[in-house]
Image: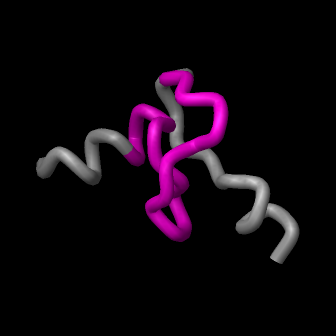
Amino acid sequence: MGEISDMILKGILCEVCGSYMEDWEEPGYPRKCEDCLQG
């Protein structure tokens, strides 16, 4: 896989819009940023 998809799967980037997560953590699973959760 590519770098971006790896970062989404690790939880560094939002799985919907691809922006960096505000906490800059790497939980090991895909997640959504606050903007995508609200909309």
8 shown above or below 37: above
Q: Residue furthest right?
A: 38
**Magenta highlight on residue 9:** yes
Query: For the magenta stretch, what is the residue range?
Result: 8-26
Q: Position of residue 37 (x, y in %)?
A: 80, 62
**Magenta highlight on residue 18:** yes
Q: Position of residue 12 (x, y in %)?
A: 46, 37
21 shown above or below 18: above
Which residue is found at the position 64% from the left and 30% from the top?
Answer: 23
Is residue 4 shown left or right of residue 27? Answer: left
Is residue 26 shown left or right of residue 6? Answer: right
Which residue is found at the position 40% from the left and 47% from the top?
Answer: 8
Which residue is found at the position 55% from the left and 23% from the top?
Answer: 25
Is residue 16 shown left or right of residue 33? Answer: left
Which residue is found at the position 13% from the left and 48% from the top?
Answer: 1
23 shown above or below 22: above
Is residue 36 shown left or right of residue 18? Answer: right
How many badges with numbers are in the image?
0
